[in-house]
Image (spheres, rainbow, N blue to C red):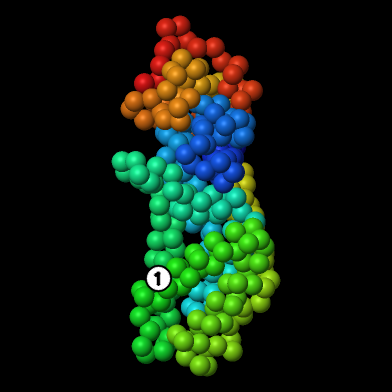
Amino acid sequence: MARQARAIQTRKSILLAAAAVFDERGFGTATITEIIARAGVTKGALYFHFSSKEELALGVIAAQLELGPLPAQRTKLQELADQGLLFAHQLHHDPLTRASVGLAMDQWGEKAEGGNPFHGRPFQSWTDRLTELLVEARERGELLPHVDPAETAELLAGSFTGIQWTSQILCERKDLTRRVIVLFRHLLPSIAMPQILPTLDLAPDRAERLLASRDAALEAEDASIDEEDEAAAETDPASETDPAAPEIDTASQADVASEADPTWEAGAAPEGGAVPERQGVTALEGDGVTAEEGNRSAAPEGHGSAA
């Protein structure tokens, strides 16, 4: 369990470092070397999780979309408004969200073959999520008869994109929450049944209250799981591990291999993808290795490129 927790923390550290570098420099000029230095891990540890800079960027986008379950509300239109208010809050405070939006709007390589592979992905995902909420709202009788969920979701996502971009240019998104509230106050009366409107909470602190409620629920769930695990361990002698069993530092071995291959510096994994696993050792066992730990290992005799 401790090793798994370390692996999860390493992946999170890499994603946060990548998000910060992408947000500051853009995808085109960001380098794997800079991300590794910011995260404080080795090349081997990074490539256990992500095989290339492109895959790392997709990981940032996916992490931004994984906000976790929000508390259920009385109406689906309240959940719709919560999505917009929370997105506005995250754009101002969360580097993963900012980097994800930056990757979606980045124009790097637009004229090159293939263009920007991330262009529009977060916005399309958000549009799909809004469409699902609006379909559910229609099924529950919350929408006016003329409302088309897909068209409304596209309008809302497009309007939000323009608003957040304007806010970014004018004041680094400091007034984004106010702008989003204004958007909802104009849009919702044209799609919602009249009796729904008085029930909607569009207060400026709505996102903070949602996050606090969600975090409290997650902490309570984690505490309950820990108690169950401890109880199971006390009643199951087979769950005890042998403290004398050696741990194999596979991420350090992968890092030594990466030093011999200059293609790692360019931000792409060697041909064949991520560093291969050693026989009998999973990639998970190498996760979470710090730069200091990863550099202790010496390369095995005759060990060359990881490709």
Relative depth, front residue between 294 and 217? 294
The single residue placed furthest to the bottom in the displayed view is: 195
Relative depth, front residue between 187 and 299? 187
Is 300 located above or below residue 113 in the figure?
above
In this rendering, does residue 41 appear at all?
A: yes
Q: Is residue 266 left or right of residue 200?
A: left
In this rendering, does residue 288 appear at all?
A: no
Picture quadrant of residue 41 = top right
Q: Position of residue 269 (x, y in %)?
A: 41, 28
Quarter of the picture containing the N terminus is: top right
The single residue placed furthest to the left in the displayed view is: 113
Please report the residue visible at 45 percent of the width from the left and 53 percent of the height from the top.
104
Relative depth, front residue between 155 and 153? 155
Q: Estimate how packed mark 1 is, as few (under 14), some (14 to 19) or many (20 or more) residues with alpha carbons within 10 Å.
A: some
Is 46 located above or below residue 66 in the figure?
above
Relative depth, front residue between 54 and 167? 167
Please report the residue visible at 40 percent of the width from the left and 20 percent of the height from the top.
306
* Disc 1 element: helix
Marks counted in the figure total 1
Is 222 located above or below residue 26 in the figure?
below
Q: Position of residue 115 (x, y in %)?
A: 35, 45
Please report the residue visible at 41 percent of the width from the left and 49 percent of the height from the top.
118
Q: Position of residue 202 (x, y in %)?
A: 62, 78
Please report the residue visible at 54 percent of the width from the left and 78 percent of the height from the top.
184
Q: Position of residue 39 (x, y in %)?
A: 60, 35
Q: Amino acid at mark 1?
A: Glu
Q: Is residue 281 left or right of residue 37?
A: left
The single residue placed furthest to the top in the displayed view is: 301
Quarter of the picture containing the C terminus is: top left
What residue is pinned by disc 1? 154
Picture quadrant of residue 235 = top right
